[in-house]
Image: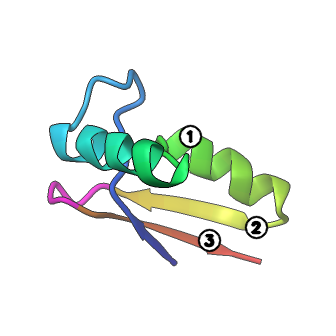
Amino acid sequence: MLVESLLYEDDSGPLTAQLYSLNMLVQTEGRERKASDYSRLLNAAGFTHVHIHHTGKIYDAILARK
């Protein structure tokens, strides 16, 4: 299970996730990702049944099984 602040698929928001992404880029060269990015990464690592749950709050949940 991953708990993350997910970006919209068109990178238009939400504002909180964009600000987190900017902060990570400046401090650690990291970034926030979209749900499709996590699905692709998890599938490539052998995880199946990837389920994305948008909570409508700051953080969203991603559940996958291996």
Q: Position of residue 6 (x, y in %)?
A: 37, 49
Kindly identify the amino acid type of the residue bearing the numbered disc 3.
Ala
**In terms of depth relative to the viewer, which is nearer, 17 or 49?**
17
Horizontal relation, residue 17 to residue 43: left or right: left
Residue 32 visible to an observer of this rendering: no
The vertical placement of 2 against 58, above or below, is below
Residue 42 included in the magenta stretch of the image: no
Kindly identify the amino acid type of the residue bearing the numbered disc 2.
Phe
Name the image quarter holding residue 49. bottom right
Q: Position of residue 61 (x, y in %)?
A: 38, 67
Magenta region, residue range: 54-58
Identify which residue is drawn at 37% across, 25% down.
11
Q: Position of residue 57 (x, y in %)?
A: 15, 59
Question: Looking at the rendered structure, which numbered label has been put on residue 36?
Answer: 1
Q: Position of residue 3 (x, y in %)?
A: 40, 71
Crowdedness near tag 3: few (<14), some (14–19) or many (≥20) residues, C-alpha within 10 Å: some
